Image: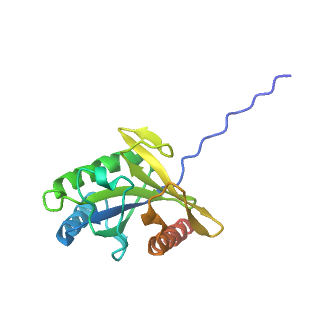
């Protein structure tokens, strides 16, 4: 008996919603970043109000202080998930250039899908998966039971109700846009 089975076709996932988390001290630096992001990526879709301060578990060992303010910019452009390392590289260049006016600025790119929210990182850790070019991917939330569930190793920032609310609304908008395709 010679039965031929055709290999199943691999499907490329749908484009993801692209966002950046920005921690800063100087409002002018933030607005310069927003302009750079819009010029390089696309128009802003949603912009959060100022949110609780983003923190880092090893804050005392960082090369610069962490700013008092944090915002999230969601951009209109949908991305392929494999773009995350190149987007991290570009955001790193923005961060380096803006550090002249705000040494605390930090730019954290990520993407949102109907099922999870992923953040890029240049730091290795047990719960991060290496992509390439020195960039790791970390699942921050999974969407279960009609809500975002923060993963245990996620920064405290992502556990604040205001942050979850922002990403819940972004997900609703994203899913709605997929339904219109």
Viewport quadrant of the C terminus? bottom right
The residue nearer to you, when weighing 54 against 83, is 54
Viewport quadrant of the N terminus? top right
The picture places residue 30, in percent across and down from the top left corner, at: 23, 67
Tell me: residue 5, above or below residue 115.
above
> Is 146 situated left or right of 109 in this image?
right
> In which quarter of the view is residue 77 placed?
bottom left
The picture places residue 52, in percent across and down from the top left corner, at: 37, 72
Residue sitting at the far front: 60
The picture places residue 47, in percent across and down from the top left corner, at: 35, 73
> In which quarter of the view is residue 32 placed?
bottom left
Colouring of the image: rainbow
> In which quarter of the view is residue 133 placed?
top left
Tell me: residue 172, above or below residue 10.
below
The picture places residue 18, in percent across and down from the top left corner, at: 41, 60
**Residue 82 seen in the figure:** no
Residue sitting at the far left: 100
Look at 54% across and 65% down and name the residue there: 178
The residue nearer to you, when weighing 81 against 120, is 120
Tell me: residue 145, above or below residue 9.
below
Q: How many numbered tags mark residues here?
A: 0
Look at 45% across and 43% down and name the residue there: 125
Residue sitting at the far right: 1
> Is 149 situated left or right of 32 in this image?
right
The residue nearer to you, when weighing 101 against 88, is 101
Look at 45% across and 40% down and name the residue there: 130
Residue sitting at the far bottom: 49
**Residue 36 seen in the figure:** yes
């Amino acid at each position: 008996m010679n039965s031929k089975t055709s290999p199943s076709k691999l499907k490329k996932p749908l484009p993801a919603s692209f966002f950046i988390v920005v921690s800063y001290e100087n409002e002018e630096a933030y607005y310069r970043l927003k302009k750079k992001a819009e010029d390089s990526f696309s128009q802003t879709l949603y912009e959060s109000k100022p949110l609780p301060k983003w923190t880092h578990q090893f804050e005392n060992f960082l090369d610069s202080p962490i700013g008092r303010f944090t915002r999230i910019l969601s951009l209109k452009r949908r991305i392929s998930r494999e773009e995350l390392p190149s987007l991290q590289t570009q955001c790193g260049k923005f961060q380096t250039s803006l550090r002249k006016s705000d040494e605390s600025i930090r730019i954290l790119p990520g993407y949102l899908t109907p099922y999870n929210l992923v953040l890029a990182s240049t730091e290795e850790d047990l719960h991060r998966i290496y992509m390439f070019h020195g960039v790791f991917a970390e699942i921050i939330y999974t969407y279960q039971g009609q809500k975002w569930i923060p993963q245990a190793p996620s920064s405290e920032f992502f556990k604040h109700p205001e942050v979850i609310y922002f990403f819940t609304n972004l997900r609703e908008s994203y899913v709605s846009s997929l339904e219109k395709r």
